[in-house]
């Protein structure tokens, strides 16, 4: 089995090495194609107005001056054009990708592009908290990742579906199990604009998150699973059509 590994944190990110270790537990044929720099939050963007620069950083290791989506396309259509990968792993992201994160996440987008191409794809993320921000529990992803992926592969991937896996913020032995979940939803009041001024008095802004206690997540969601120290496994579809509302619109415009 040929495995293509990518991420959105960049070619030098520790989570990329973790993802490669997970991939090597599945296969000896592992290739790494990752962004030259941190691309967190770029979602499923393509570089259409700038050329892609490809740099070989080692044996079967390549850096692309572009987005995670660019990396997957470059990996499948160029580097591995003669023999496509059988599996794409995107991650392991430093920080969870749950709820609305999946809309913004370059990690999820890497797996999404794989699904578009028709290759089984998994996004992997390691949650962290205030105390583990600088040193996430990477061992949790390393310990549990291969077994989770093997079981999903054995079941088989439906067409146009990717799998989003989030490991909880706890040591490997503290994991309470695996939950198959739906995508959660946060209180969007958590997002805010942090206004500041530079040394010359000119304003600038950061998108930031409000501090404080957050409401209890809905049961059965990725948010709830990770909060309970469980591995969240969430299937995501490429088809974003809302069929109930489509039916109502059809009646409206008939």
Image (cartoon, grey):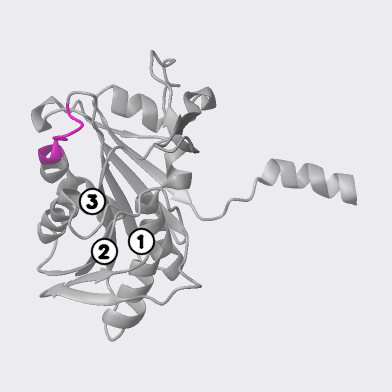
Task: Tell me which numbered mark, 1 or 3, is placed earlier along the sequence.
Answer: 1
Labels 2 and 1 touching (C-beta < 8 A): yes
Q: From what the image shows, is residue 155 above or below residue 182? A: below
Q: Which residue is mark 1?
A: 68
Picture residue at 50% right of the left edge, 28% below the top: 192
Given residues 233 and 140, the one toward you in this image is 140
Given residues 185 and 193, the one toward you in this image is 193
CA gap between label 3 and label 2 equals 20 Å
Does any portion of residue 113 appear in the rendered image? yes
**Which mark identifies residue 34?**
2
Element type where label 2 sits in the image: strand
Residues in magenta? 132-140
CA gap between label 2 and label 1 equals 7 Å
How many residues crowd around disc 2 within 10 Å: few (fewer than 14), some, or many (20 or more)? many
CA gap between label 1 and label 3 equals 20 Å
Given residues 108 and 57, the one toward you in this image is 57
* Magenta-colored stretch includes residue 139: yes
- Horizontal side of 45 relative to 93 (left or right) equals right
Q: From what the image shows, is residue 71 above or below residue 78? A: above
Residue 121 horizontal/vertical position (percent): 33, 59
């Amino acid at each position: 089995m040929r495995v293509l590994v990518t991420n959105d944190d960049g070619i030098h990110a520790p989570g990329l090495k973790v993802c490669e270790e997970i991939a090597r537990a599945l296969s000896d044929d592992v290739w790494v194609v990752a962004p030259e720099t941190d691309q967190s939050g770029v979602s499923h963007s393509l570089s259409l107005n700038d050329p892609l620069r490809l740099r070989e950083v080692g044996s079967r290791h390549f850096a692309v001056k572009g987005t995670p989506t660019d990396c997957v396309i470059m990996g499948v259509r160029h580097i591995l054009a003669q023999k496509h990968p059988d599996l794409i792993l995107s991650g392991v992201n430093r920080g969870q990708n749950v709820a609305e994160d999946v809309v913004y996440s370059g990690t999820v987008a890497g797996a999404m592009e794989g699904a578009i191409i028709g290759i089984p794809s998994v996004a992997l993320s390691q949650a962290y908290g205030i105390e583990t921000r600088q040193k996430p529990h990477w061992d949790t992803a390393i310990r549990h990742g291969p077994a989770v992926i093997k079981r999903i592969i054995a079941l088989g991937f439906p067409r146009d579906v990717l799998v989003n896996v989030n490991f909880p913020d706890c040591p490997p032995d503290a994991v309470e199990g695996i939950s198959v979940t739906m995508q959660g939803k946060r209180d969007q009041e958590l997002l805010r604009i942090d206004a500041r001024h530079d040394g010359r008095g000119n304003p600038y802004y950061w998108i930031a998150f409000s501090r404080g206690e957050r409401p209890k997540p809905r049961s059965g969601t990725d948010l709830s699973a990770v909060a309970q120290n469980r591995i969240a496994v969430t299937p995501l579809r490429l088809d974003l059509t809302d069929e109930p509302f489509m039916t109502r619109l059809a009646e409206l415009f008939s």
